[in-house]
Amino acid sequence: MLEILKKVNEPKDLKTLSKEDLNKLSEEIRQILLQKLSIHGGHVGPNLGMIEATIAMHYVFNSPVDKIVYDVSHQSYTHKILTGRKDAFIYEEKYDDVAGYTDPDESEHDFFKIGHTSTSISLASGLAKARDLKHENYNIISVIGDGSLSGGEALEGLDYVGEQGSNFIIVVNDNGMSIAENHGGLYKNLKQLRETNGTCECNLFKALGLDYVYVNEGNNIEKLIQTFEKVKNIQHPIVVHINTQKGNGYKIAEENKEDWHWNMPFDKETGKLRFNFSGEDYGTLTADYLLRKNEAR
């Protein structure tokens, strides 16, 4: 019984809910996501980890006037549910009515067709520039995962935004993972920030001229709401660094983060795949082709 979700048809409906109802809503969304993913397949870990943060963003901000831009869109399922597309996650016959990524053809709450990594900061900075040139006043929110953060376009975007002296909110969804474990100097700094509750002297974001706030409990709706309310309408660029749990609320995905980034249809109780997908795949075919060519030289 989706007691709370049935009341939510657009983001403004969230503002009528109590904090208790918002937490109930997160569990109802988790329930329907797991049901759809178990039948249809899709991105499991990223979406389960962003349920609470997405609810909090839509509770505080005023989409689509305030514009939320998702990176890769791996974590946009809850966003779609809250912006008028919940039937595509509730009813099996409607599962294919929406894309796996954001799509402006689907909703006024989506601003780009995004299916690749490291793009959201650059794209959102363009929206912010257009807003400023037109002397308009609303929030621009870029959502990016820590895995996407090391991409060249993301780093170039951060560098540019550091000089943009107007409202720009970058939500860094840090679950300590990309598809697999992250490696590199940037991730050492993110780890230091997590371990010091955001207080360590070395801070990549501040070094780039950005304001910074850290939320250790990135799956706590109330703390996220408090933070987003503090940064709403801020008139300079700021990073909101949230420490989330990939696969949150589904133990199998929490314990096997890499395998459950994306998955084929599965049994919810055991995590076993519903079908035996044996046979050729593009990765194997490409590797075998290259090996044969190399051996023939």
Image: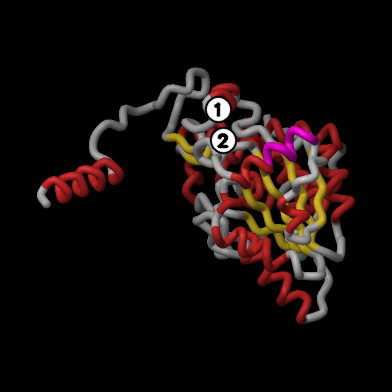
Could you say where residue 51 lies in the image, as x and y percent from the top left? 68, 39
Residue shown at 21% from the left, 49% from the top: 290
Above-or-below relation of 117 to 256: below
> What is the secondary structure assignment of the residue under circle 1?
helix
**Label at residue 45:** 2
Binning the other alpha carbons within 10 Å of mark 2 as few (below 14), some (14 to 19) or many (20 upward) gives many
Of mark 1 and mark 2, the one earlier in the sequence is 2
Could you say where residue 40 lies in the image, as x and y percent from the top left? 45, 38
Q: How many marks?
A: 2
In the visual, does 203 lie left or right of 50? right
The chief SS type of the magenta part is: helix
Above-or-below relation of 123 to 22: below
Residue shown at 50% from the left, 53% from the top: 99
> What is the secondary structure assignment of the residue under circle 2?
helix
Give, as a single range, the part of the protein colored magenta.
190-196
The answer to whether residue 4 shows anywhere in this view is no
**Label at residue 43:** none
- Closest to the observer: 238 or 124? 238
**Is residue 191 a member of the stretch shown in magenta?**
yes
What residue does disc 1 label?
253
Above-or-below relation of 165 to 212: below
Could you say where residue 90 lies in the image, as x and y percent from the top left? 58, 39
Rounded to the nearest angstrom, the CA distance separating label 1 from label 2 is 6 Å
Could you say where residue 195 lies in the image, as x and y percent from the top left? 74, 33
- Closest to the observer: 226 or 146? 146
